[in-house]
Amino acid sequence: MRSPIASTDSWSQARAAATSPRPWPSRSSGRPTVACRSCWPAGARTHRCSTTPTAVSAPRCTCSPPGCTVQARCRRSRPGSGWRSVWPREFPPPSCFREGEHMADPANEVSVSKELKFYDENRVRLSDVETLAELQQDILRASFQRGAVQLESGVEQPYFFEKYLMVARPTILRRIARFLAARIPAGTDRVAAPTLGAVAIGTAVSLESGLPLAIVRSGQGDKRRGRAVEGGLHPGEIVVLIEDVVVTGQRALRAVEELRAAGVEVGLVVSVVDCDRGAAAEFAKAGLDYDPLFRSSVLLPEGVS
Ligand SMILES: O=P(O)(O)OC[C@H]1O[C@H](OP(=O)(O)OP(=O)(O)O)[C@H](O)[C@@H]1O
Ligand SMILES: O=C(O)c1cc(=O)[nH]c(=O)[nH]1
């Protein structure tokens, strides 16, 4: 049964867009690109999302732009994970799109004839570089806020990355975890994250990498029974610190001090965003390598620095 929200018009438009011979922009190979943002199975680090839509369904969101409504079942997604949305890359999801809205909703499923298997032979996989560029855009859309702010560290910045809006979105968090986990060197025993915001990312990286997690209580006077680090650390472990947004790097450095005081070795800090305020030099002084996923010099929109 088709969703009652879809109008006949939008359904016809979606169908027409879906069946047109070249629905998405071509790459140099002349083949269309399909990018699914939602179906990397956890733990499959080398698996890139490559979906084969087998059916289309009517849009439930009436303000979706035409052509932006194709739904696909990911062949490799876990059984029962239902339907996933695939957005043509030139159209971001409309602002009213709620992630997961379409998933596992049999009422939204439409069976179609074989002619609509239009990607089968033509799909291509996105490279890591393309996936990272896409993640960059999604992070900007989800969490970048323009406007001067005085940060807790005293730094004045003309923008703010609201990290809680990054970690609140599973499709963003999953990709962040995948890329950060890929930065963890072999031989690492554990990942660690300071409270509060980085804990969600640390947990996701722990799930992705299979490494146990330590949580560093970063608030003043926040120790529980005198313990600043939770998670059952063993002295001598090699630990990578995960941070969300790094500005001065002071919070990460405090966390590293706590970890070292607990007897573990920390040689690397990874973060999602580095705001280019000199943290890298501070980390180097403390004997730490530093590997942010995005530097603000690359990430920020034009005109913001
Ligand atoms: O100048 P820096 O030391 O690099 O600080 C920047 C970090 O501090 C912030 O945490 P916040 O104080 O908002 O704590 P929270 O995670 O508990 O919200 C936030 O996570 C920033 O990433
Ligand atoms: O310095 C911070 O607290 C900070 C900066 C920023 O851009 N984003 C954030 O979540 N915290």
Image (tube, rainbow, N blue to C red):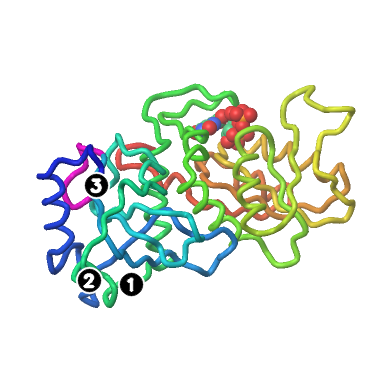
For residue 286, above or below residue 197? below
Q: Secondary structure at mark 1?
A: loop
Mark closer to the chain start, 2 or 1 = 2
Q: Which residue is mark 3?
A: 2
Q: Is residue 20 magenta?
A: no
**Which residue appears at 29% of the width and 36% of the height?**
95
**Is 256 in front, or is 10?**
10
Mark closer to the chain start, 1 or 3 = 3
What distance separates the C-alpha of mark 1 from that of mark 3? Answer: 29 Å
> Which corner quadrant holds the C terminus?
top left
Is 37 on the left-hand or right-hand side of 232?
Answer: left
For residue 165, above or below residue 180? above
Q: What amino acid is found at the position of numbered circle 3 in the picture? A: Arg
Q: Which residue is mark 2?
A: 114
Seen as rendered, the residue at the extreme front is 1
Q: Which residue is mark 1?
A: 124
Within 10 Å of disc 3 (Cα), the crowding (few <14, some 14-19, many 20+) is some
What distance separates the C-alpha of mark 2 from that of mark 1? Answer: 20 Å
Q: Are marks 2 and 1 in contact (CB under 8 Å)?
A: no
Is 205 on the left-hand or right-hand side of 266?
Answer: left
**Is 121 in front, or is 190?**
121
Within 10 Å of disc 1 (Cα), the crowding (few <14, some 14-19, many 20+) is some
Is 288 on the left-hand or right-hand side of 77?
Answer: right
Q: Position of residue 255 (x, y in %)?
A: 74, 39
The response on whether ligand 2 sits within 8 Å of label 1 is: no
Q: Quadrant of residue 197?
A: top right
> Which marked residue is nearer to the observer: mark 2 or mark 1?
2
Q: What amino acid is found at the position of numbered circle 2 in the picture? A: Lys
Q: Which residues are magenta?
A: 61-68
Q: Secondary structure at mark 3?
A: loop
What distance separates the C-alpha of mark 2 from that of mark 3? Answer: 18 Å
Q: Secondary structure at mark 2?
A: helix
